[in-house]
């Protein structure tokens, strides 16, 4: 029999407590059983123990990264074995994963009298899984030096805690809390194929922080006599995705810092001798903050400052054509096969996942899809490397484009009225053995693709929250992300029922550029409540003053039809003390918004607080409200909530030539399209910041109707929703957009239209002027 040697952790003082009568369940002694009974951790799903109770499994009160475990005692037990690891490596629940040392963070054995165990000094803000089994006394031995030998036997109990995520009662997941605020003292840049530079700045830049954060840093991070932070060593480590990547020994083992010499060199440390197309983690450490715990284990989680990642350059290969093929494989979940055959679509999320992990496919790889064919993603798919996914240009030249379903082709595990959906995920969850540093991504481009969730269901379909998804989201506890560029060009999107792009969680989020150009959005939003509120089209969270997804946001030449979001964009409504060099630069030009957010009264711009030195450009947009004369639906249209410019107090506004067409009497005058929060309002809107207007005056903030106001039905062929609300009764399909958007939104070809300012000044999305609006996506200039 195989023998495993473990440290007898039960002798550790911090790990033991006495057993109270009220948390012990008595079972038949071991001699009377073929196998020891299985114990359970005390958690809400099996004992109704809430996190507020003393004997709950949870993060220890008053700590951030110590977990306490409580379980039920078994009479006659020889002891208990506990295994734990980072969640992402153990969610399968299989013995193969739970026995793999690369997936485990630790294994402990405690004596039979111990029903409480604490595991301190875990990684911060990391989800863990825990499992436990009861050891039979006849199959363990105490060896020399307090070691225990476990003799594998079926006499030991079954493991508790190995549910695969669907069995709530049979797994224990606990996430540690976020680490306290940490000075940002390093970043990596100037990458080449075999090298990059590390930039170190140990000077104190906490001046703009809150007093509480200053106090935390003062207590946890040492300083030199001249006021700089103390650091001794820089490490360069291959990321877990490419653990065998080359690193020079001096950086692998720790590059010693001479702080004075480093400062004279501008803080630059050059690293070469690296592998191409490989990801590296950079860590900087104060060795004075390392200690040895009672187990004799070296603990260093509090010795590091911020971590950084960087991927060396690689040479992308020729574009890869993903030839359309429907597999004959029968999956465990048969709904895959049902959806594949119903929609004749090929699964490709596995291809992108394999690209993320590939050490040979370089960032920047282009993937072509066959025009006229359908593909699908079945699971959430991480974005960790830059790539392009587009319809084969040869097919585009013939007027054909690929369709990609973000699931939405079958029920979720057979549950009726619950369509399976998925998202692209910015970044990733923290994996076993990974350092919690932001994932760096270059350029991600989606071009000339029809994205859809064909069986999407909104609130009105279900009478409860819709089952839709985002196009791209983040894991709430996942690693941070830095993006060079996210570009959506010439695509269509239908059935993304929550928001469209969302960042969340406390980790860093930095996007240098987001471009949404020449796209059509239909039937998106309307996830929650009768008014379709809850989620914004683009949502950047405000968990950190350093987060910025609006560095350079460009929304240009798009059409939004019946997208019932809470708003077009927001970063949340909390006041922020942004760094002086953080700015938002937002451009919204030549877009057509038709019945956008009319139920909730969506704000196009929702920024109660805005960083000084930033800019907003809003020009040549067309806002449309369309409904039949006897359609009693609400047609709310709200402009902006814009209140405080922080820092310098200066904002640059470029507003000009925004127009509207409507369908009710109130709409046929300048600003008449709005039911509240005009752009030009002098309170809580842009009118209060008219000194920042460039090239005009406050009248440029008006949304105009032109010299002769047009009705929506006078400009477009037939823009009204295909179903009506009459006397307060909603048609089951009244939330759906017009059935053939490309025919019914075509501009009318008469003098009233062609002589109007909207036509002459090229206001809105120009595709609706064309003889064939559907082919406008072919022009990506």
Image (cartoon, rainbow, N blue to C red):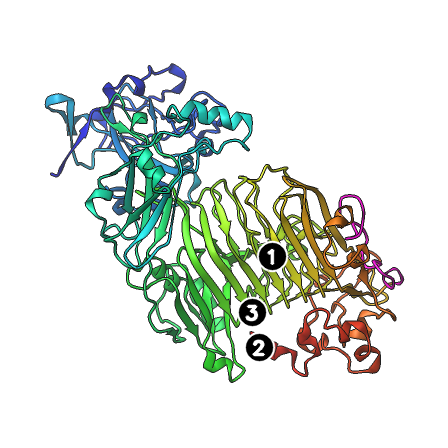
- Badge 2 or badge 1: first in the primary sequence: 1
Q: Residues within 10 Å of mark 2 (few under 14, many from 20)?
A: few
Q: Badge 1 is on which residue? A: 497
Q: Position of residue 263 (x, y in %)?
A: 36, 37
Q: Does 275 sit left or right of 323 as displayed?
A: left
Residue 672 highlighted magenta (yes or no): yes
In the image, the segment drawn in magenta is: 665-685
Determine whether the residue tagged by mark 3 lies in a helix, strand or loop: loop
- Badge 3 or badge 1: first in the primary sequence: 3
Out of 495 and 357, give the one closest to the viewer: 357
Q: Does 283 sit left or right of 630 as displayed?
A: left
Residue 647 visible here:
yes
Residue 557 highlighted magenta (yes or no): no
- State the quadrant of the N terminus: top left
Q: Position of residue 241 (x, y in %)?
A: 30, 52
Which circle marks residue 491 in the picture?
3
Residue under the image location 33 percent in, 14 percent down: 18
Q: Badge 2 is on which residue? A: 779
């Amino acid at each position: 029999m195989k023998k495993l040697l473990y440290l007898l952790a039960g002798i550790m003082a911090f790990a033991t407590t006495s057993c109270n009568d009220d948390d012990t369940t008595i079972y038949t002694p071991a001699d009377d059983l073929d196998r020891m009974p299985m114990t359970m951790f005390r958690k809400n799903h099996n004992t109704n123990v809430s996190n507020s109770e003393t004997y709950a499994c949870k993060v220890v009160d008053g700590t951030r990264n110590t977990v306490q475990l409580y379980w039920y005692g078994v009479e006659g037990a020889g002891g208990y074995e506990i295994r734990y690891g980072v969640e992402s490596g153990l969610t399968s629940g299989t013995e193969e994963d739970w026995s793999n040392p690369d997936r485990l963070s630790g294994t402990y054995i405690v004596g039979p009298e111990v029903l409480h165990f604490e595991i301190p000094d875990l990684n911060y803000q990391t989800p863990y899984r825990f499992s436990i089994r009861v050891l039979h006394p006849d199959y363990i031995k105490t060896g020399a030096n307090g070691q225990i030998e476990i003799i594998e036997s079926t006499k030991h109990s079954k493991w508790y805690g190995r549910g695969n995520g669907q069995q709530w009662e049979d797994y224990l997941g606990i996430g540690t809390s976020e680490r306290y605020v940490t000075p940002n003292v390093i970043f990596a840049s100037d990458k080449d194929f075999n090298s990059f530079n590390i930039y170190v700045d140990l000077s104190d830049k906490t001046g703009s922080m809150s007093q509480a954060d200053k106090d935390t840093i003062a207590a946890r991070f040492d300083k030199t006599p001249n006021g700089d932070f103390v650091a001794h060593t820089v490490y360069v480590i291959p990321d877990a995705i490419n653990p065998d990547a080359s690193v020079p020994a001096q950086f692998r083992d720790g590059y010693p810092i001479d702080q004075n010499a480093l400062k004279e060199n501008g803080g630059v440390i050059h690293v070469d001798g690296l592998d191409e197309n490989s990801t590296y983690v950079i860590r900087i450490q104060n060795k004075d903050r390392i200690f040895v715990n009672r187990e004799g284990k070296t603990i260093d989680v509090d010795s590091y400052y911020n971590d950084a990642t960087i991927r060396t350059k690689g040479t992308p290969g020729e574009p890869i054509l993903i030839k359309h093929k429907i597999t004959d494989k029968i999956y465990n979940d048969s709904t895959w096969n049902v959806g594949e055959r119903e929609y004749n679509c090929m699964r490709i999320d596995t291809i992108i996942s394999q690209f993320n992990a590939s050490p040979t496919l370089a960032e920047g790889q282009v993937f072509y899809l066959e025009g006229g064919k359908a593909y699908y993603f079945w699971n959430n798919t991480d974005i960790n490397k830059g790539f392009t996914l587009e319809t084969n240009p040869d097919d585009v030249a013939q007027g054909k484009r690929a369709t990609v379903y973000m699931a939405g082709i079958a029920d979720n595990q057979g549950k009726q009225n619950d369509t399976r959906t998925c998202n692209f995920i910015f970044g990733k969850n923290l994996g076993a053995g990974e350092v919690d540093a932001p994932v760096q991504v270059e350029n991600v481009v989606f071009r000339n693709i029809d994205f859809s969730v064909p069986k999407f269901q909104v609130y009105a379909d279900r009478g409860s929250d819709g089952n839709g998804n985002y196009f791209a989201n983040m894991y709430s506890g996942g690693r941070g992300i830095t993006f060079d560029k996210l570009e959506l060009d010439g695509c269509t999107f239908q059935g993304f029922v929550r928001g469209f792009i969302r960042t969340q969680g406390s980790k860093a989020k930095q996007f240098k550029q987001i471009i949404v150009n020449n796209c059509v959005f239909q039937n998106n939003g309307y996830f929650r409540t009768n008014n379709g509120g809850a989620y914004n089209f683009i949502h950047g969270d405000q968990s950190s003053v350093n987060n910025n997804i609006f560095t350079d946001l460009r929304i240009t030449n798009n059409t939004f039809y019946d997208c019932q979001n809470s708003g077009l964009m927001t970063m949340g409504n909390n006041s922020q003390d942004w760094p002086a060099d953080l700015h938002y630069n937002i451009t919204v030009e030549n877009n057509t918004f038709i019945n956008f957010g009319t139920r909730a009264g969506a704000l196009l711009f929702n920024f109660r607080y805005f960083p000084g030195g930033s800019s907003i450009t809003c020009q040549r947009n067309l806002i449309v409200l369309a409904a039949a004369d006897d359609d009693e639906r609400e047609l709310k249209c709200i402009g902006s909530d814009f209140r405080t410019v922080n820092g310098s107090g200066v904002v640059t506004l470029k507003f000009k030539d925004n127009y509207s067409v409507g369908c009710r009497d109130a709409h046929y005058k300048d600003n008449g399209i709005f039911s509240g929060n005009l752009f030009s309002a002098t309170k809580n809107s842009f009118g209060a910041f008219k000194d920042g207007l460039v090239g005009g005056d406050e009248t440029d903030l008006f949304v105009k109707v032109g010299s002769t106001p047009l009705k929506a039905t006078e400009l477009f062929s037939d823009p009204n929703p295909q179903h009506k609300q009459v006397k307060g009764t909603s048609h089951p399909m009244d939330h759906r957009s017009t059935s053939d958007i490309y025919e019914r939104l075509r501009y009318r070809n008469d003098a009233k239209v062609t002589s109007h300012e909207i036509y002459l000044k090229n206001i809105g999305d120009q595709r609706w002027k064309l003889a064939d609006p559907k082919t406008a996506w072919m022009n990506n200039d």
